Amino acid sequence: MTPGERAVVARIDIPPEQRGRLMEMGLLPGTPVELVRFAPLGDPVEIKLRNYHLSLRKLEAEKIFVR
Amino acid sequence: MKTFTVVLTGNPNCGKTTLFNALTGLRARVGNYAGVTVERKEGALTGADALHPVTILDLPGTYSLSPQSPDEQIARDILFQRVADVPAPDLVVIVADASNLQRNLYFATQVIELGHPTLLVLNMIDVARDQGHEIDTEALSKALGVPVIPMVASEGEGLDVLRQTLRGQAKTPGTRHVIPREFNELPEGFGREAQAIETALEGHFPHRSRLAAAEALLLLSDERALSTDGSTGGPRYPETLIQQVQSARQRLEAAGVDWRSAAIEARYARLFAIEQHVTRETAPPGELLSDRIDRVVTHRVWGLLIFVAVMALMFQSIFWLAQYPMDGIEAAVDALAQWVGSSMPPGDLNDLITRGAISGVGSVVIFLPQICLLFLFIGLLEDTGYMSRAAFLMDRLMSRVGLHGKSFIPMLSSFACAIPGIMATRTIETRQDRLATILVAPLMSCSARLPVYTVLIAACIPQRNGWPGLTLLMMYLLGIAGALGMAWIFKKTLLRGEPPMLILELPPYKRPMLGAVLRQMWDRSKLFLRRAGTVILGINILLWFLATYPRSSEVEEQFIQRRAQWKQSVSNPPTPAETETGLQLDHEEAGEKLRQSFAGRLGRAIEPTLKPLGFDWKIGIGIVTSFAAREVFVSTLSVVYNVGGDGENTASLAEVMKSERRADGRAMYTPLTGITLMVFYVFAMQCVSTVAVVRRETNSWKWPIFQTVYMTSLAWILAFLTYQIGTRLGF
């Protein structure tokens, strides 16, 4: 995805025992997300979902697949 | 008379603290929960009926009942009535951000299901309205089964309604409502398993039976809720129950149900439907002011420039602005000591009070301006929302050594003083990251090292070609490298754990509430004074004792005689040269007494360990007394070399040091000795105040002791290498 692009989460390939908090924050399969920007040093990334802004490292963001 | 206890809870950044301040005025009590460094804030509702007082407890911001940090754990445990010294809530007030409804309701509905008498404050409806979301609070109240009060806490809108409700409830407490489990349309099988666990829980813990339904759901779906190792708090569950939960999870897995996510997905599906039902969109979504600010503040170029400017301003203020009140405090403490000293008969008690107690307390109070300023800045950064942006910007750098973006500010603050730096680590959620930051923070060269560096550079380093400045810079860089390197090592070894996942909310910017920020600054500073102060005072008195005893009557007599001789020989009035001799006599006496004291003997005793570093026993005394605080090194050396006690005479001390010779006639303070000694001071843990604060912040003696041992060993090893390699190279 590139900054400004919107998509819908298809699946999250982070191990189930680590992704609990992410899902509790509302990032679930079927959730619409927007990639807002990358941090000035290239990592982490800022996304927008459910009308709020969240920041994740690229390492994790790359394991979230969208359609 | 029983106090009516209201518990205030909600997501971070939902305006909960603003509401708390508005309800309690500025008279809240701030402390800590027993055994953990989680801030406990409670206060009385202002304007409450004298016969029906209301106490409001502000829980730390929480995203869910499956805790990820000590803050969230305390919040969960209080809601589950597991905290011994917190009474069961008579009313739970959930604060939810109307502009971020779904995620706020995730936690809100979890709390509603606990079945306490509950009401929901829908805060920031103005922000939601500006974004074009009109929320029907009556429909929301119906959907949630609890009263909903719309509010704009920052403007005071809706506050009176809430106040009246609280007062009314205190007079005639509401009964708890029965919650149909309507926020979770659980998949086939999941509900049945949860029901069975609920029944078992009711049997095991009959006194908490009304929480059983919610607890069963958490036990089934929260990975760590079952753990009994105490790391997540929680009660110890009987073995049979653990077995039951585990086999239920296995059955669900076999049936293709993901027990970890089923409840989360079901809840969000329900919340999405509720939001659709209660919200009317009045405007198309547009770009918000906060988004526009972020385009500059997190910009590739401007963002970094702004960040550097903010940090420079903060650092400069802590370093320089604090200097003026610090000088004032120092002067006041000295004046007080002088006054007490002169109005009491001379003797050991006089000395203990003036040099032990007063200067001991002074050594704590002197840090107060720096601590206040740092907390003021941190408060402003947090309150405006910039703090999360700082973490967002710096995460890349900090993640290189395995830390979190939030570790940046504590480390930077430690340049001024490790104490506020360590206290600032409270914003870091992960225990491992927080500990790693605490362990390395004192390696950053604090302002107390500056006088040590200054005098050593003046005495040992050639005063030309910019060498002094370069040496100073090298020492600061060495500290940074040491801190980052050790953080990396700790995160690889001792504090290894799951690689921390960054889940950082970037809340909308808002105008800071200055009154609340100042208030918070003062509360935190007071906490430091009270708790750390007692330990530091005790240790200072101990060090005073070591530097004063034992007294040798021989030495005292010798100086009485010499002084008598001096008195006979002086002309009236004494010539400047004679006055000088008299002062010299005082310095010599102080020096001789220190050399005879326990501290002096300790200095000699550790000489063998210092020889490989090129130090003698005189430096040894300096190192021993430096364990009170590093800058004491300068005043101690002044006493040892008979220059006079106050640290002001850096220049004259440096002159004396330059002329100091070793037994074989070589100069004592060569550039190599100076650099070796500075390297030692970069790494050694020599600050009782820091030790006391680490003890307090980690709530154990294990970490401060470990920290002192590792830092001092590292200091010795690196000083050893510096001296030995330097000698081999012919310096």
Image: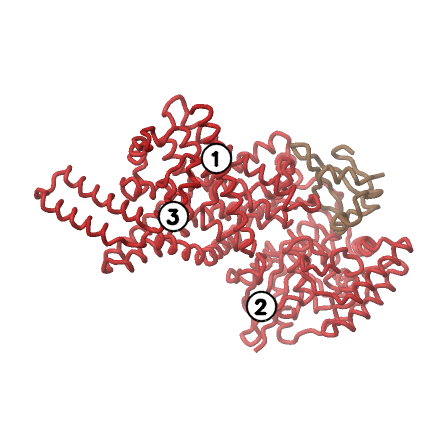
Q: Is residue B191 depicted above or below B371 in this figure?
A: below
Which residue in the rendered view is the most extreme toward the top? Answer: B465
Q: Earlier in the sequence, mark 3 or mark 1?
A: 3
x, y (%) of residue B709?
Answer: 52, 46
Measure how far apart labels 2 and 1 are at the Cα level. Answer: 59 Å
* B10 relative to B445 in the view: left or right: right
Q: Circle 3 marks a residue in which chain?
A: B
Image chain in red = B
**Amino acid at dot 1:** Phe
The residue that disc 3 covers is B602
* B131 relative to B325 in the view: left or right: right
Neighbor class of circle 2 (other Cα within 10 Å; few <14, some 14-19, many 20+) is: many
- The answer to whether any part of residue B3 appears in the image is yes
Q: How is the image coloured?
A: by chain
Residue depicted at 86% across the width and 63% down the height: B193
Residue B655: name its quadrant: top left
Residue depicted at 71% across the width and 56% down the height: B64
**On residue B55, which mark appears?**
2
Neighbor class of circle 1 (other Cα within 10 Å; few <14, some 14-19, many 20+) is: many
- Colour of chain A in the image: brown
Image quadrant for the N terminus of chain B?
Answer: bottom right
x, y (%) of residue B84?
Answer: 62, 68
Residue depicted at 53% across the width and 74% down the height: B50
